[in-house]
Image (cartoon, rainbow, N blue to C red):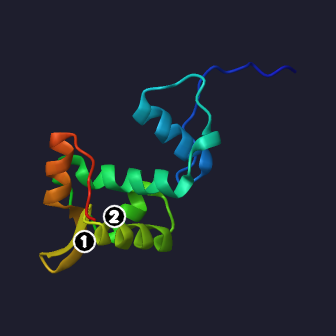
């Protein structure tokens, strides 16, 4: 019995290299001839987390980001600490919950479309 070929492209599992390539293709608007040959997975994850926090001034806890991204807790925490040290995001406590949001300086740079420089 032959299987019918499907043209439906499913979304890859969160956190996998295929998922990162998929996210990058969606961000870049390229759906064809896009390969992950030159994609650095950790950089792609950091960009994904930054964009998640920038959406509508999101304030997310570590557990929220774990659910949204599917990345490991350690990976998320290290990315958050790194992004915070460069001023892209900031750690806050709201309603007794520690969480993360995009920093004001990062938002201003994005609105001006200028590269962020903290050094």
Dot 1 falls on a residue whose secondary structure is strand
**Which residue lies at the image location 48% right of the left edge and 26% below the top edge?**
30
Single out the residue that lies furthest toward the bottom: 96
Marks 1 and 2 sit apart, C-alpha to C-alpha, by 9 Å
Single out the residue that lies furthest toward the right: 1
Q: Nearer the viewer, mark 1 or mark 2?
A: 1
- Mark 1 vs 2, N-terminal side: 2
Q: Which mark is residue 30?
A: none
Quarter location, residue 46? bottom left
**Which residue lies at the image location 49% right of the left edge and 74% below the top edge?**
74
Q: Position of residue 50 (x, y in %)?
A: 32, 55
Classify mark 1: residues with Cα within 10 Å, few (<14), some (14-19) or many (20+).
some
Q: Which residue is mark 1?
A: 99
Do the CB atoms of the residues marked 1 and 2 lie less than 8 Å apart?
yes
Left or right of residue 28: residue 107: left
**Which residue lies at the image location 31% right of the left edge and 72% below the top edge?**
85
Q: Which residue is mark 2?
A: 64
Single out the residue that lies furthest toward the front: 119
Q: Position of residue 19 (x, y in %)?
A: 55, 45
Q: Position of residue 119 (x, y in %)?
A: 28, 65
Left or right of residue 103: residue 10: right
Work out which quarter of the rendered image holds the N terminus and state it: top right
90 w.r.t. 112: above or below: below
């Amino acid at each position: 019995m032959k299987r019918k070929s499907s043209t439906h492209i499913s979304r890859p599992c969160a956190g996998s290299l295929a998922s990162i390539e998929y996210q990058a293709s969606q961000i870049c608007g390229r759906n064809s001839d896009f390969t992950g040959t030159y994609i650095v997975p950790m950089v792609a994850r950091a960009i994904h987390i930054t964009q998640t926090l920038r959406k509508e001034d999101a304030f997310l806890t570590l557990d929220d980001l774990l659910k949204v991204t599917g990345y490991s807790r350690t990976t998320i925490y290290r990315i958050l600490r790194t992004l915070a040290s460069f001023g892209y995001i900031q750690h806050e406590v709201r309603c007794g919950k520690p969480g993360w949001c995009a920093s004001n300086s990062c938002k201003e740079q994005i609105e001006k479309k200028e590269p962020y420089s903290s050094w």
